Image: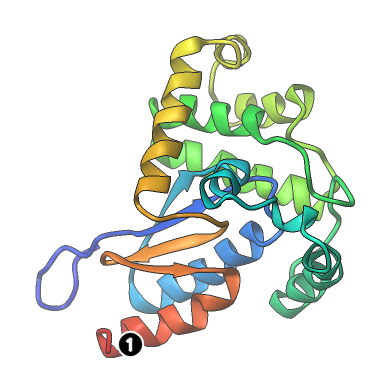
Amino acid sequence: MINAGGKMQDPIAFYFDFVSPYALPGLIALERVCAMHGRTVEMHPMLLDEGAKAMGLPLLVDTPLKGDYMVMDAPRVYAYHGVPFKPALERFTTSSLVPQRLFCWMLRQDRQRAERVARAMLVANWSEGTDVTLPENALPLVAAAGFDGEAARAALDDPAVAADLDGRVKAVIERGVFGSPTFFVDGEMFWGSDRTHVIDRWLETGGW
């Protein structure tokens, strides 16, 4: 995207995990902010369990008091953003290796289509009650976007794809990302789906 002064504007980086209940509302809110400011979204994979490990902490959902709060809070966040809330799993604890490996595999071929599939997976997992951490639910979404279904299935067990995801996750942690969703706006880091209004003001004022 090019601004009025002719300067190319970087996309806003969106780091997310498919098993984060806040990823979908965070993405939807960010899309709205980007539309107002003429920016684009660039999606990147992260793994919540690796972020928690780097901090030496349990996953949020497994943390006493905080975990119960998150289960109670998530429906309110979806209602606030006008997004249906129908989670595939009640406690949000399943590994996201299947969709994240598929996402990495797709990114190496076509970023735009990969991001459309990733968004569809988030919608399926959190608004339609379809567990995309299972290959039988994730792979049809990949194939529906025009990717080779058999190649996608093989990618799940491909060491090169696993190494790609591992490398991306390590780079994410080195950048300071620990939770989902996390946003980077022109190098500035914001964490949490409730920070999109701050990003809106940041873009409006040019930072402060």
When the figure is inspected, residue 46 is found, relative to residue 5, above or below; the finding is: above
When the figure is inspected, residue 85 is found, relative to residue 92, above or below; the finding is: below
Give the residue type at disc 1.
Glu
Exactly how many numbered labels are in the figure? 1
Which one is nearer the viewer's eye here, 27 or 20? 20
Q: Residue at x 86, y 65 (%)?
A: 68
Based on the displayed image, in which of its 4 quarters is residue 167 positioned? top left
Give the x, y percent position of residue 57: 63, 53
When the figure is inspected, residue 34 is found, relative to residue 91, above or below; the finding is: below
Which one is nearer the viewer's eye here, 83 or 50? 50
Pointer 1 residue:
204
When the figure is inspected, residue 82 is found, relative to residue 2, above or below; the finding is: below
The answer to whether residue 141 is left or right of residue 189 is right
Which one is nearer the viewer's eye here, 94 or 147? 94
Give the x, y percent position of residue 50: 56, 41
The answer to whether residue 108 is left or right of residue 23 is left
Give the x, y percent position of residue 120: 65, 45
Residue found at the far front of this picture? 56
Residue found at the far left of this picture? 6
